[in-house]
Image: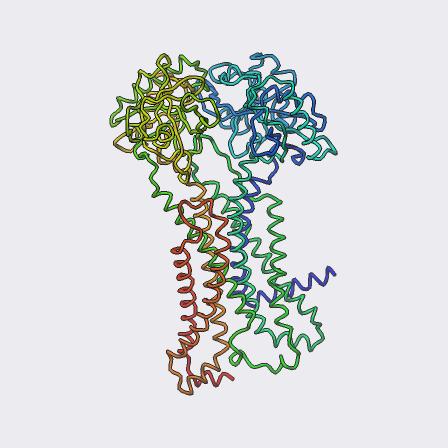
Amino acid sequence: MIQTIIGDVRLAARMLGKNPVFTLVAVLCVTVGSGALTTIVSATSAFLLRPLPGASDGARLVSVDRRSQDSSEGVSASYEYYEHLRERARTLDGVAAWSKVDLSIAVDGQGTSVYGNIVSPNYFAVLGARPVLGRFFDPTEGRTPLADPVLVVSYGFWHSRLAGATDVIGRTVGVNGQPYTIIGVAPPGFRGVFTPIETNAWVLLGMQQQLRPGRDLSGSPWLRVFGRLAPGVDREAARRELTNLTTEYIANASEPAGYRAYNAARLYGLTGLPEDASRAVGGFMGLLLAAAALVLLIASVNVASMLSARAVGRRREMAVRAALGAGRGRLVRQMLTESVLLFLLGAGGGVVLALAGTRALEQIPVPSDVPLSMQLSPDLRVLGFSLLVSLVTGVLFGLMPAFQAVRRDISSRLRADSAGGASGGTSIGRILIVGQLALSLLLLVAAGLFLRALDRGHRIEPGFDPSNVATVSLNAESWGYDEARARTFYRALRQRIAVLPGVSDVSYTGVLPLTWGGSGSSIQAGEGTGSAARIPIGLVSVDAGYFAALRLPMLRGRGFDDGDDARAPGVAVINETLARRLSADGVALGRTFGFGGKRVTVVGIARDAKYSNLGEAAASFAYFPLAQAWQPNQVLLVRTAADPQRLEPGIQEAIRSLDPALPPPAVITLQRATSIVLLPQRIAAMVTGALGTVGLLLVSVGLYGNISYSTTRRTREIGLRMALGAPRPRVIRMIVQDGLRLGIVGVGIGLLLAVIGTRLMAGLLFGVSPMDALTFAATSALLTSVTVLASYLPARRAADCDPMAALRSE
């Protein structure tokens, strides 16, 4: 059998080599389709399926969520809850906890801002990671608060900031202004359990009072928990035990009543993303996968159409082989071998294309102050998937042409006319062309809708002016500052920035608008205490000058000033929507509401704006003064008349003059920072636009090749028509009409598919209907025009032939 297969492959290679142009075009078609699908599959695998880098036996790692009974809501874990699970869980071999922490690591007096994790002592042990240098945390460390200032650094940080020195173990560095000892270096590629973010350092939970003084190790929820399933234990058994332990914890713990509703546990695989993020990313990647699969289908249909046309020309060859004793099964197998070989060659080219494609996706700029680390290149599993898809598509799309080549009896095939006298085409070829056109239209409609949504997003008025504003993310907690020192620093920095040339307004905010970083709460309207009197709101803490810096209009009253400090009565600025909730006439100045256990007075009403995303409806929103709602992490806002990026040297010098040990901050324009809300639409428009263009080119080539081939086979018929007096324009019109009929049928079927398929995109379209008439009409017109052009070119060539020469070709 092996010798037969090898013989088939050798013969297939010789047959493909005899027609290099056909082989090259077919392989290129498959390369494009396979490369597109492999690229998106590789990205999807990296986000959702790939095991955690550096961890061992990842299939047994599970994330543990504390949820409500119906799993509709969840809450983070407190340290006490984590300890309860760690000490009592028997279905898990270990339970670990972690949370993010912003760190400033000073090496030789020069600070570097890094994203870090504050973790339980068994964090690395539960993951099964091994250090490349030194050791990880010992189970006895971290039990006494502030007793173990030790640090594990990433492999990348070790090389970039510590020069890869082998004597780094035991070295003391500054962490948030305090001395810490490096005890280990994580393995290459290890990024913890939240892999999209580049984590560079790990510290113990016992150092929380120093590194995250706003949190505590009591009953407040702020940790994420994960564990490792014990051998032979399935996820459902572990879930039942952890749910029982959660119920037991609630019965004995003295935590706020609001947390008691979260009395169940839910487990899911630890893949580098939280489950809610996994669902969102999974849905988005599913749309891109569908688009890439369409391109592969179009490419495969293209190749099948070429094979079908080639099979017609090889009927005499197949007849001779059959006359010499080859059975039908043997002939079909040989044709399938050629088809599979074409698709495997294309898959090889697709892998090369995927390597370039994933590298391009990794370079997409993401406006974020968090260091992102995307490693999307294909791994062995993705390569195996690509090989399997190529084998399957090679067989599926090679069967029809193979049976077409051998379906007629020997004598009729031996008596068949020459190419010049054959009929124009086959029903199989026409069906394949119609399928190509329908799939291409669906892909083009998707690309058009995303482009329309992106354009609409750019046109949506956010309610403020993001132009000419520089932003700098600052975190005094990561510098080791207490509240008094941080307040002094922020005040002094504002004064120094305000005198820089071209600066008109300076302020601070806790969270930038339109950066997916908003938070919510509720207020108590009036003096009532019932649930009906509570109003859900979005909120942010801002400094004096915020509304001027963002050019966010104040409709009534005033914004905040330096007098709204911690000693002054509580005040707030609210938006129009909340004003209408508090007062029937919308004039809510002077009204009070309950928030955070105190009464707050409305001193201003600002215009409604977009806060979390551009597609949100008008919602109640409140602004509170930072001086009365202190937080150590703040974002500096600087409005200037010139290019805000030019302020970077001046801002960095102002910070350096106040504290030379601080790491130099990055300056990002507000326009770039807020553009992250359109990132899904931008990526979708870019990917589907590229895939749509490729699909259109494939359809154009396939349609042109099919019509050109069928026209060539009608040479004798066309010559006879012209010899009998048919004018040249009529011949052209006849051929174009044949192609146009195929185009109309394909476009019609494609429109039906688009009506069904585009409904899945509705959540990503800003103010654009999935049934957008302009997009449907434009893409239909484009595809119809391509059909006419692809038909006209071979029609004109056929009409230029000499009738007598065509008749003598027999």
**748 relative position to 727: left or right:** right
Along the viewing direction, whichever of 299 and 605 lies nearer the viewer:
605
Near-viewer residue (734 or 555): 555
Q: Residue at x 66, y 79 (%)?
A: 410
Q: Is residue 479 above or below residue 680?
A: above
Placement of 518 over or under 249, stated as above or below:
below
Q: Position of residue 535 (x, y in %)?
A: 43, 28
Please give the count of numbered marks on the rendered protein. 0
Is residue 510 positioned above or below 444 on the image?
above
Q: Residue at x 53, y 26 (%)?
A: 164
Q: Position of residue 504 (x, y in %)?
A: 26, 26
Give the x, y percent position of residue 56. 66, 33
Q: Quadrant of the N terminus?
A: bottom right
| Left/right of residue 806 with respect to residue 241 in the rendered view | left
Task: Answer with the quarter of the image where residue 66 lies.
Answer: top right
Q: Residue at x 55, y 40 (%)?
A: 279
Quick check: 549 left or right of 443? Answer: left
Where residue 667 sits, quadrant-wise, is top left
Q: Nearer the viewer, residue 255 or 638?
A: 255
